[in-house]
Image (cartoon, rainbow, N blue to C red):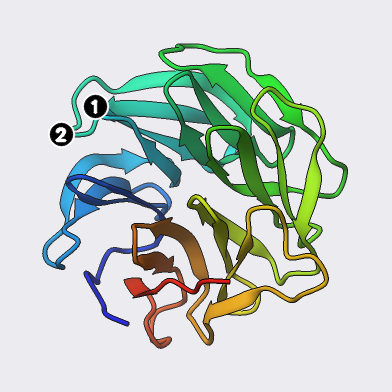
């Protein structure tokens, strides 16, 4: 494992793009959105003074994030220079994590389920994809057919078709799962309650337990992937091992 950048306050969201690792810092009253080089180094800020910037996602030109507060907003800006700050959807029920594809924006509202709006929306009224009782949806990721999310309340990892309906459980009884990411074969998630980063196939773990990528982390929070590596943020309290850091490890194959 390697530390890429530190001293980032309270980093919780991370997403990999062609320019580096985009991150969000939810320090109350002074939250930021920025970028860290994948080789490590000084962070570059794109937005500051955000209301608990939390989930983060990007297209080829824009970065999107959520404000993790009651009646929080979903925001966007140019991912190169931070210009064009826009409110995508206002007054959401504690919006948490966010994902985008070529057609739509998806995010988790802890008070209202997994929701979506068309890409390019402003002041959108979201469509509900799933509102499973007791789930408390948190992390979210997409592939070409499905949306995947973690249930911070019930400890489940779930998926549903992008258009909604037919939700299924991929893993259960996990320790407060939060951030999640996927590739063509597997999903990876962070367990803030157990200090683990874990993975299982995109069709579910079945009778097997998830494979652990890392253990003993300082409240691991969000996850990103490239072809060979898993990246995550550690949100733990100051003084804890690897707290306030962005981490890297080799992928595990099933």
In this rendering, is residue 6 above or below 46? below
Report the side of 112 relative to 197 (left or right): right
Residue 181 is at least partly visible in this image: yes
Q: Which residue is mark 2?
A: 80
Which residue is more in the foreground, 200 or 45? 200
Image coordinates of residue 102 in percent, x first then y, are 42, 22
Report the side of 154 relative to 14 (left or right): right
Crowd class of label 2 (few under 14; some 14 to 19; many from 20; radius 10 Å):
some
Image coordinates of residue 252 in percent, x first then y, are 49, 74
Q: Residue at x 18, y 25 (%)?
A: 83
Report the side of 34 relative to 234 (left or right): left
Q: Residue at x 84, y 40 (%)?
A: 132
Which residue is more in the foreground, 130 or 49? 130
Q: Residue at x 22, y 33 (%)?
A: 79
Report the side of 101 relative to 248 (left or right): right
Q: Are marks 2 and 1 in contact (CB under 8 Å)?
A: yes
Q: Residue at x 32, y 64 (%)?
A: 9
Answer with mark 2 or mark 1, whichever residue precedes in sequence.
Answer: 1
Q: Which residue is mark 1?
A: 61
Residue 94 is at least partly visible in this image: no
Q: Which corner quadrant holds the C terminus?
A: bottom right
């Amino acid at each position: 494992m390697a530390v890429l950048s530190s001293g980032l306050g309270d980093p919780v969201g991370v997403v990999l793009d062609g320019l580096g690792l985009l991150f969000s810092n939810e320090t109350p009253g002074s939250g930021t959105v920025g970028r860290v080089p994948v080789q490590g180094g000084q962070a570059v800020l794109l937005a500051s003074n955000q209301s608990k910037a939390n989930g983060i996602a990007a297209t080829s030109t824009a970065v999107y994030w959520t404000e993790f507060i009651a009646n929080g907003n979903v925001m966007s800006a140019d991912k190169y220079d931070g210009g064009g700050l826009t409110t995508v959807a206002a007054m959401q029920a504690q919006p948490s994590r966010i994902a985008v594809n070529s057609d739509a924006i998806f995010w988790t509202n802890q008070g209202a389920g997994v929701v979506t709006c068309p890409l390019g929306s402003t002041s959108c009224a979201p469509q509900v994809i799933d509102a499973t009782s007791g789930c408390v949806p948190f992390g979210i990721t997409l592939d070409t057919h499905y949306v995947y999310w973690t249930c911070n309340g019930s400890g489940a990892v779930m998926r549903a078709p992008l258009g909604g309906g037919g939700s299924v459980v991929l893993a259960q009884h996990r320790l407060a799962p939060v951030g999640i990411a996927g590739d063509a074969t597997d999903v990876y998630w962070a367990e803030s309650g157990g200090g683990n980063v874990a993975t299982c196939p995109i069709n579910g773990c079945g009778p097997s337990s998830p494979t652990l990528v890392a253990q003993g982390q300082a409240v691991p929070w969000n996850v990103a992937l490239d072809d060979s590596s898993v990246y995550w943020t550690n949100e733990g309290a100051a003084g804890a091992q690897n707290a306030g850091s962005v981490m890297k490890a080799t992928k595990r194959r099933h």
